[in-house]
Amino acid sequence: MDGQSAVPSYQFVLNGRSVTVDAPADMPLLWVLRDKLGVTGPKYGCGVGVCRACTSHLDDAEIQPCTVPVQDCAGRRVTTIEGLADGDRLHPVQQAWLDQDVAQCGFCQPGQIMTAVALLRRTPDPTDADIDRIENVCRCGTYFRIREAIKQAAAAGS
Amino acid sequence: MLDPLRPPGPCPAAVREGTSPISTPTTPRSVSRRRFLTYLVAAPALAVGAQLALDGEPAEALPGIPDVLDLGDALILAGLPTSHLLVLEVTSAGRVVLQLPRLEVGQGLTTAMAMLVADELGARLGDVDVPLAPARPELLFNQLTGASNSVRSLYDPVRAAAAAARARLVTAAARRWSLSAGSLRVQDSAVLAPDGRSASYASLAVEAAGVLVPAVPATPKPVSQQRLVGQATGRIDARDIVTGKAKYTGDLDIPGAVPTVVSRPPTINGTVRSYRADAALAMPGVLGVVRIPTGIAVLAETFDQAMKAKAGLDIDWGPGPLATLSDEDIRGRLRDAQPPFLVPPLLTQHVDAEFDFAFVSHAPMEVLTAVADVRADRAELWFGAQAPIVAQQAIAAELGLPLSAVTLHVVRGGGSFGRRLFFDAGLEAAQISKAAGRPVKLMWTRNDDVRHGRMRPASHHRIRATHALGQVLTYEHRVATVRTDFRHGLGEALTAAAFDLSVAGITLSQAFFLLTEKLPYELGLSTQLLAEVPLEMHTGSWRSVYSGLVRVADEIMVDELARTLGQDPAAFRRSRLSDAAGRAVLDRLVQAGDWGRAMPAGHAQGIAFHAEHRSSVAYLVELDATDRANPRVTKAVAVADVGRVINPRGLEAQLMGALMDGISVTLQAGVHIDKGAVREGSYADFRYARQRHSPPEFAVHLMPPSGSPGGAGELGVPAAAAAVANAWARATGTSPRSFPVNF
């Protein structure tokens, strides 16, 4: 890699801890998390923001890290599935996922949960129509239990 | 003579044109007579093995496939001679460990097995670990995850091993306390004495390893005493999943394994004529470029850099072997391949129908991923494998290494639906690691998965039913599919189960077809024939395999027959189902689903039934097709009889997933072939169902236990798909012939 220009450095808050990482500006956050920081909760499923298996939060909003360059995260808060629980105490949405036994293969579920948390933040008492707008793919077809879990979490006032 | 597990079916077996049935009335070694020997495995703490034992003499090789046998039975037969089937350990740290010779891909198998162990052993569920065993060649045919056969094949041996371990733990406690073993009981991973003393399994594990002859019976308890089996239980790995701790192959931190992707041709099985990698090699983070038979691999420090460098490769691609073929051409070949009907038209009243089903991608959420560390004298691999022994053999042969020098760690899969029967990524990872001289973590992109991955073959169906005076006289179903690739050990397994396919003059695919495709209705003289068109493309079993095509077409045809004869579709089915369990399932569904209730214009109910894997299921769906471009299943009810349910919650999950598969492939999800290439490339255009396509109302009703566990993983797909198709027909007033209907 002769002649390569200096790689920029970015600082952000990841799951409550400040991290600094050297990465090209246009590297999607997903690969910074997975390949540089070893944070593997966000999953690759398509790389183009369609399947949403990587869904995480930037500040408090839902993002798909496969389409967000790391430079856009500088100085901000990034939360992945690993940062959702408070120590051993699960987030109410995670608890609802356990109570409804939502997961099958589990691969899309970190993204589903992060999407649900963001939805409930925006819309604390979502209707079926609100839930219908969730785009995350679950190839195992757990949608009905996802819907039930979101309703449970909403009822619990998460 | 007949298998006692199942009464003779109402329909004759598949009949070859103008000849006698292929099937033979001779049944090989009956599955019902299998039993299990248990034995101590030398270990510092308690380890018990269970081994299948044969009663009676091995059968002669059979010239054909008995129609009373199904594929699951055949696979169980294939596993009979396998020793060291299962080993259950109780460690002095108090863990109960079952090394599972199967793959977990979301079907809930590890949870079901942990429940069986905990119940039989008297252990806490949380004390049971069910890691996936690495490839174990000595298991021969007993490490294949497929055909909805895992619970069917493991229910007895797992309980046998746990019962033998329990007897030894109790005996060890009895010796320690100088009490009668018969006076002790077990609970919560401990042996309890009448005087209140207790000894944990952890504390007894070493002593129990010295118990050669248990003082209490070492046989599984009667089902009436089961406490956990049959109880709705959450997945044992659910907490790991919802916290992001669950590790899939791409999440493993294998030292030195660098991110790797492969540039693949624009057409299926296209070739590399020549390539230049200079520009790619100069890109940031790139660690190497190597050529493999399927394309050009790029190794880099991150997947992002590998993918960007892949785009920087300059490759001259040769066209693939199908480069002149598109969907219409393939459909034409399928039509041409179909054998004619036996019954000519015009002799009597008849109903004819033709159906087409598109190719369907497996598209598991986790793309194929494999880690390989190939050295000069050994190789170590990690990936989700449904057939790990076959994968290990193929990889050893590819690398020129002895089998014993290749270790294959089986890693949980992020979905499969049949895809991980094949080990395409594992083989490529081995080739790349060998060529590059370093460990690699190979990931297929989603484009790779859809465009070069395997798929359910397209099929064409012709069905003719003749009828007179309200009775169906004949029912003929001609199926033509692009050839399904079964080269993942199935042929060897069937041979081991004493089927000589060469004597029968049938192909492996036809054997699979005969073992799985059974019409559950009395529809006069019925015949089903499979014709295959071999094409050089990547096919494979897709959840429910032929039944997802054949039985869907059957169930649509049954609705049309009922309409022609002026009968209610549910009543028509019921009157022609000879199996009482099937009739009970249908009756329950009609009641629970409120079949026949009035629906608004553009809405309709649809119903369908399917029996396979010693189980039966029926679905009722309600469909809103007022917007034909965006139909919505608004409600679904399923009723299933699987003989004996291990985990009702897991079974309901399987039936829910099967419903979504049925909705997807019937209404909107498939892939096109355009001049030898797959048109679609991701979930944006391979339109697997989203939340807005799932019914907000869904219920499952399970029939009471009636015997041994049947299979359930694939069970729901045919009936779910057909119920949706039948609802579509009624809601739109059309006769759907091509699936998905919106494609």
Image (spheres, grey):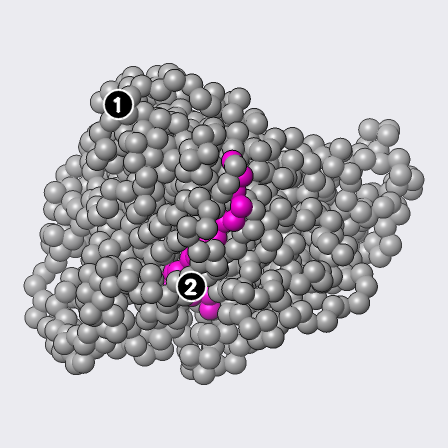
Residue B143 occupies quadrant: bottom right
Left or right of residue A16, residue B376 in this image? right
Dot 2 amino acid type: Pro
Is disc 1 placed on a helix, strand or loop? helix
Q: Position of residue B640 (x, y in %)?
A: 55, 35
Residue B578 occupies quadrant: top right
Left or right of residue B741, residue B545 in this image? right
Residue B708 occupies quadrant: top right
Dot 1 corresponds to which residue? Answer: A129
**For residue B483: magenta?**
yes
**For residue B344: magenta?**
no
**Residue at the (69%, 32%) spot, across then down:** B227
Chain under disc 1 = A
Vertically, is B258 above or below B215?
Answer: below
Q: Which mark is residue B339?
A: 2
Observer-nearest residue: B9 or B349? B349
**Residue at the (16%, 62%) spot, across then down:** B308
**Residue at the (22%, 66%) spot, across then down:** B325
Q: Which residues are magenta?
A: B470-487
Vertically, is B321 above or below B29?
Answer: below
Q: From this viewpoint, is residue B740 visible? A: yes
Chain under disc 2 = B
Vertically, is B653 above or below B420?
Answer: above
Left or right of residue B114, residue B535 in this image? left
Q: Residues within 10 Å of mark 1 (few under 14, many from 20)?
A: few
Q: Are marks 2 and 1 on the same chain?
A: no
Dot 1 amino acid type: Ala
Q: Main secondary structure of the magenta part?
A: strand
Q: Position of residue B616 (x, y in %)?
A: 57, 40
3D distance between C-alphas at marks 2 and 1: 49 Å
**Residue at the (30%, 31%) spot, across then down:** B733
